[in-house]
């Protein structure tokens, strides 16, 4: 059985390494926040990620239900309309489009 001081030193070193690894990304990113590239990524990445997600979901739904492509198109139209009419409230437009799609698939 190892000595108590050895175990305490091991836990302390592991804690310091963990703390350092968690703090390192924040320390590295602080000077980069003023970079034009990082600011541009912060501006465009959320929209790009949502676009990729939307394309993947639409592709999968069109492949799963080829006879109900009209439901996908109507739901996309509702999502876009609600988004533009509600001053670009993303959660509201996503909820409206999802609700419309689920209702169209289940009721029609």
Image (cartoon, rainbow, N blue to C red):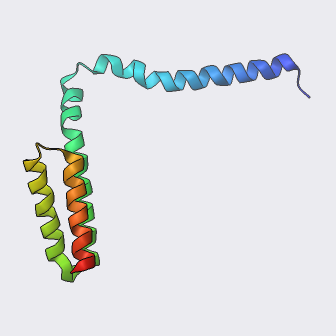
At a point 20% along the width and 66% down the height, the residue shown is: 100
Query: Does 66 appear above or below 29?
Result: below
Quarter of the view holding residue 71: bottom left
Q: Of 79 and 58, which appears nearest the observer?
A: 79
Q: Position of residue 56 (x, y in %)?
A: 26, 62
At a point 70% along the width and 19% down the height, the residue shown is: 12
Query: Does 72 appear above or below 49?
Result: below
Q: Position of residue 51 (x, y in %)?
A: 20, 52
Quarter of the view holding residue 25: top left
Quarter of the view holding residue 41: top left
Q: Of 81 and 17, which appears nearest the observer?
A: 81
Q: Classify the position of the N terminus by image quarter.
A: top right
Visible residue check, residue 65: no
Q: Classify the position of the C terminus by image quarter.
A: bottom left
Query: Does 26 appear above or below 81?
Result: above
- Is residue 27 toward the left or the right of residue 10 in the image? left
User: How many badges with numbers are in the image?
Assistant: 0
At a point 19% along the width and 79% down the height, the residue shown is: 68
Query: Does 20 appear above or below 81?
Result: above
At a point 66% along the width and 25% down the height, the residue shown is: 14
- Is residue 61 toward the left or the right of residue 9 in the image? left
- Is residue 19 toward the left or the right of residue 6 in the image? left
């Amino acid at each position: 059985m190892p000595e108590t001081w050895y175990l305490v030193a091991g836990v302390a070193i592991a804690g310091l390494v963990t703390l350092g690894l968690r703090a390192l990304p924040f320390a590295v990113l602080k000077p980069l926040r003023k970079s034009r590239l990082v600011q541009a990524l912060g501006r465009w990445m959320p929209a790009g990620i949502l676009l990729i997600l939307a394309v993947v979901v639409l592709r999968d739904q069109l492949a799963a239900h080829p006879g109900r492509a009209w439901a996908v198109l109507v739901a996309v139209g509702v999502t876009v309309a609600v988004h533009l009419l509600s001053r670009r409230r993303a959660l509201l437009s996503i909820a409206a489009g999802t609700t419309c799609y689920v209702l169209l698939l289940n009721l029609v």
